[in-house]
Image: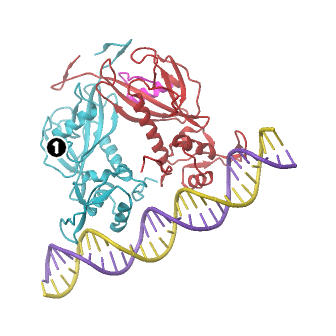
Chain colours: A red, B cyan, C purple, D yellow
DNA sequence: CTCTTTATAGTCGGTAAGACCATAAAGAGA
DNA sequence: TCTCTTTATGGTCTTACCGACTATAAAGAG
């Protein structure tokens, strides 16, 4: 399968796909959307949702389309879709040459998963708890890279608000950091730091207050205009990252 | 040009290429390796070096091969090659569907450029000074993205040593930061910060000293084992990055 | 009514970073 | 030779921030 006609070169045609690592927060834990493969190879194994890039699409367009097909989410909600990197190992797919552009997506609230497309089943599974076995293809590595990217992203950018509904409390925002980093944060210090960063969040000036459960009702905030955090909101130092 | 045989799908074959933004420091200024295109489209325009991914290569392998072909550098020197992102706009190449995986590379000293491959000419041109017109294809955007990535990378990682020879002075290392960021840094504060970061640099214990020109001879250092900087070496706040 | 839970405000001490000064050691030029 | 310039290196000072901690307020659970 070799195509002539591009300058003086002969080149191998590749199939180009997108793979999506879609994260959300539910019950205070970070979860990722996984689908069960219905066909070989890796039939019955879990995998990241994804699909082929169509002839008239960019990878970004294809990723947004796949995300909408799998979750029903379109761009109207404040969702975040970010290109991660491209995985192009020659034998990453045993059938043929497939180059995959991976994306990390952050969605606020877990909507019902419609098992659209060819996915046998789809579900939000807690990340990093061993709740699922090894994924198909090289998706374990893609998922780990996506998690690292998201963890670094909420450190330097206002990305964390993408996990939250349009209006949220500072406790919910803190829950995002704790779920992604897997570490507890001091509520008072977190509050001081977030409010000291201009443009990160803005109070909903109407005396609107809301509480999900116990405790004193919290004030509501919405995402501010800033996109980067200066200075960054550093995560607590952990083992292995000196 | 549509290929059947992958599951039940029909998919469009893509050509996959790599594009390289190769940076170096010469005369205290940041320079990028550009080649002049010898054929249409964009004949005579400057472009980033690059080429096709061969059937048995990953994009990383292809990038390393192209870098070696263009500059004569192989992996033996402490060079840095990092995947940037993938550009897949459907009409980014007027001839056909080409998906390009872009890489950013950092090389220590400008070796002689061998105009290998199909590049008519190749040269190290100063970045961001208008010394070259608009680049071919979407390479202006790729180059800008690469510069932003390198600028952020030396903030959080030990990447800056990749611009330096195996042994270097702290003045040379500071020159890397100043050239990439386009801002002056206080020599004393820079020294304090770098030496306070464990594993960033290590003194060459032999009383070896060296000076390139005027001034007191500086002590020599080599890259340390650390890969990430904690805390990051923040660049001075500039306009437009609040 | 009391306990628990969460939000919010404030304090205190350590650390880091920027601005700045001082000294040392070389070359350049008068 | 002497002086000036240049660069490296060491130090101080002040401010800002950050983590740890305490205290208070306001709700629900029992």
Please tell me which residue is depicted at 12% across the width and 41% down the height of the picture: B115
Please, what secondary structure does the residue beneath circle 1 have?
A: helix
* Magenta stretch holds residue B155: no
Left or right: where does residue B39 sit relative to residue A67? left
* Residue B186 quadrant: bottom left
Please tell me whether residue D2 is drawn above or below residue B119 in the rendered image.
Answer: below
Q: Quadrant of the N terminus of chain B?
A: top left
One can see residue A227 in this view:
no
Q: Residue furthest front?
A: B206
Residue designated by label 1:
B71
Residue A204 % position (x, y): 65, 47
How packed mark 1 is, by other alpha carbons closer than 10 Å (few <14, some 14-19, many 20 or more), is many
Residue A160 % position (x, y): 53, 42
What is the chain letter for disc 1?
B
- Residue situated in front as seen by the camera: B169 or B239: B169
- Residue situated in front as seen by the camera: A131 or A197: A131
Please tell me which residue is depicted at 58% across the width and 39% down the height of the picture: A164
Please tell me whether residue A34 is drawn above or below residue D21 in the rendered image.
Answer: above
One can see residue B228 in this view:
yes
Q: Which residues are magenta?
A: A49-68
Residue B162 % position (x, y): 27, 50
Q: What is the count of numbered marks?
A: 1
* Magenta stretch holds residue A65: yes
* Residue A26 quadrant: top right
Residue B227 % position (x, y): 35, 49
Left or right: where does residue A10 sit relative to residue A112? left
Please tell me whether residue A58 is drawn above or below residue B83 in the rendered image.
Answer: above
Left or right: where does residue A79 sit relative to residue A43? right
């Amino acid at each position: 399968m070799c195509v002539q006609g591009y300058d003086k070169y002969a080149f191998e045609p590749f199939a180009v796909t997108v793979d999506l690592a879609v994260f959300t927060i539910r019950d205070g834990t970070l979860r990722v959307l996984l689908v069960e493969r219905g066909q070989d190879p890796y039939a019955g194994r879990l995998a990241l949702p994804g699909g082929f890039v169509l002839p008239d699409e960019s990878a970004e367009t294809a990723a947004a389309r796949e995300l909408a097909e799998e979750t029903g989410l379109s761009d109207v909600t404040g969702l975040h879709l970010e290109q991660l990197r491209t995985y192009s190992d020659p034998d990453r797919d045993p059938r043929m040459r497939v180059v995959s552009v991976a994306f990390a997506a952050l969605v606020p609230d877990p909507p019902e998963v419609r098992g659209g497309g060819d996915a046998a089943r789809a579900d939000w599974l807690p990340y990093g708890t061993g709740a699922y076995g090894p994924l198909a293809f090289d998706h374990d590595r893609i998922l780990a890279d996506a998690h690292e990217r998201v963890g670094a992203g909420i450190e330097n950018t206002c990305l964390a608000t993408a996990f939250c509904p349009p209006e949220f409390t500072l406790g919910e925002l803190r829950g995002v950091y704790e779920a992604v980093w897997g570490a507890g944060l001091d509520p008072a210090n977190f509050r001081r730091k977030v409010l000291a960063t201009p443009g990160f969040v803005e109070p909903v000036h109407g005396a609107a207050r809301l509480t999900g459960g116990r405790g004193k009702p919290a004030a509501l905030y919405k995402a501010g205009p800033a996109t980067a955090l200066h200075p960054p909101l550093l995560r607590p130092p952990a083992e292995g990252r000196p």
